[in-house]
């Protein structure tokens, strides 16, 4: 079973405009509402690959009801802890030609310790040996940076695998609990390690440092370049297929979804990351906040190039 954990989900509203002009009234040519949050994005990609996952996290208010109903309408199971306040709404303004966007994220509702313990108890009830858990995204107000670490500790006790996709002190604390995989992007890796990330060698050194912090395996996502994988046996750059990007928002989440899906199908880490970068490229090539379909992802797999370092 695959679970995705989203602690600070959102209703994502996207507005498309001809161009972004400051100090002016812009009229949207189209609008779209999606059920957002990094873990939810992973669940949507997994559904497109034919796998049902359960989306877990904190939600609240009418926006929380909208999220729950929307995810269930997509065939995604949910396991939520309800909190006081309103689940946040994030606004994206995307140019019609694609390639440029502005995204404004609300902070999210405050989550007290009692609700945090309720979620930890729920995770302990759900997790079984061999399950995969994707822990993704930012923390809501009230939740300390060690929360993901607490989750990973509980998952390790139950012999479930954790994939950690976050940044800052949450990433540092989480790595100390030895998740199966940590997936920072280059900015998150730079902030965590304090190391430059201008060359492949520097990215590789940063990945090694993150492994020393405790992560068993590390993937550093590098946008259009693809992603660097480092394990105890190899370091490899997986080059992304060349696509015309229409909207890169959510591409990193699709990468995680494709990677985890492939791992559950028995692929090795390197081949799984190939599925991941193909999934990310597929999503980036689509308008709006659509995610790549299985057919599109499979069509891009032949363009994935593996470079041992």
Image (spheres, rainbow, N blue to C red):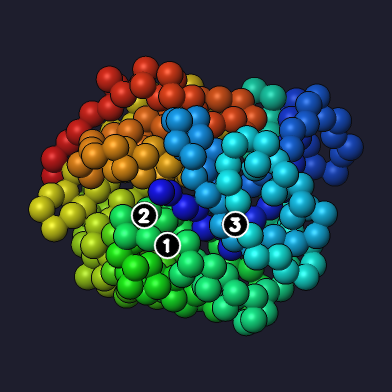
Where is residue 222 drawn, in percent x and y?
Answer: 37, 44
Residue bearing the label numbered 1? 127
Where is residue 297 drawn, in percent x and y?
Answer: 40, 24
**Residue sitting at 13 percent across and 40 percent down?**
308
Mark 3, other Cα within 10 Å: few <14 / some 14–19 / many ≥20: some
**Residue sitting at 42 percent across and 56 percent down?**
133
Q: CA distance from mark 2 to mark 1?
A: 7 Å
Image quarter of the C terminus: top left
User: Would residue 179 appear left or right of 286 to someone viewing this image?
Assistant: left
User: Would residue 114 appear left or right of 262 to someone viewing this image?
Assistant: right
Where is residue 42 drawn, in percent x and y?
Answer: 50, 44
Residue bearing the label numbered 2? 131
**Residue sitting at 13 percent across and 58 percent down?**
232
Q: Which mark is residue 157?
A: none
Q: Is residue 109 above or below residue 224?
A: below
**Image quarter of residue 238:** top left
**Residue sitting at 37 percent across and 17 percent down?**
299
Q: CA distance from mark 2 to mark 3?
A: 15 Å
Determine the secondary structure under disc 3: strand
Q: Nearer the viewer, residue 199 or 297?
A: 297
Determine the secondary structure under disc 1: loop
Q: Is residue 264 above or below residue 241?
A: below
Q: Which mark is residue 79?
A: 3
Q: Is residue 240 in view from this perspective?
A: yes
Q: Earlier in the sequence, mark 3 or mark 1?
A: 3
Task: Tell me whether the residue at label 2 lies in contact with that at label 1, contact meaning CB atoms closer than 8 angstroms.
Answer: yes
Q: Is residue 194 in view from this perspective?
A: no
Q: Is residue 269 above or below residue 29?
A: below
Q: CA distance from mark 3 to mark 1?
A: 12 Å
């Amino acid at each position: 079973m695959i679970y995705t954990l989203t602690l600070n989900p959102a209703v994502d509203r996207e507005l498309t405009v001809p161009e972004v002009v400051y100090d002016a009234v812009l009229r949207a040519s189209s609008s779209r509402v999606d059920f957002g949050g990094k873990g939810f994005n992973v669940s949507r990609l997994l559904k497109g690959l034919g796998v049902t996952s359960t989306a877990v996290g904190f939600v609240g208010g009418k926006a929380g009801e909208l999220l729950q109903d929307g995810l269930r309408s997509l065939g995604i199971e949910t396991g939520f802890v309800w909190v006081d306040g309103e689940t946040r709404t994030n606004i994206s303004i995307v140019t019609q030609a694609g390639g440029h966007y502005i995204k404004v994220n609300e902070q999210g509702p405050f989550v007290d310790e009692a609700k945090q313990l309720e979620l930890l108890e729920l995770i302990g009830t759900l997790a079984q040996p061999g399950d995969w858990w994707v822990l993704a995204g930012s923390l809501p107000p009230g939740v300390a940076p060690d929360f993901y670490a607490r989750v990973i500790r509980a998952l390790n006790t139950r012999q479930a695998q954790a994939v950690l996709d976050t940044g800052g002190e949450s990433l540092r604390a989480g790595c100390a609990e030895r998740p199966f995989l940590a997936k920072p992007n280059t900015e998150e890796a730079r902030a965590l390690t304090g190391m430059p990330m201008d060359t492949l060698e520097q990215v590789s050194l940063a990945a090694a440092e993150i492994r020393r912090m405790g992560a068993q395996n590390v993937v550093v996502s590098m946008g259009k370049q693809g992603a660097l994988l480092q394990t105890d046996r190899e370091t490899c750059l997986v080059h992304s297929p060349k696509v015309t990007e229409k909207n890169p928002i959510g591409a990193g989440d699709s990468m995680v979804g494709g990677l985890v899906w492939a791992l559950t199908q028995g692929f090795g880490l390197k081949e799984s990351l190939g599925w991941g970068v193909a999934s990310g490229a597929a999503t980036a090539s689509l308008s709006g906040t659509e995610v790549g379909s299985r057919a599109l992802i499979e069509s891009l797999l032949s363009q994935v190039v593996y470079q041992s370092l």
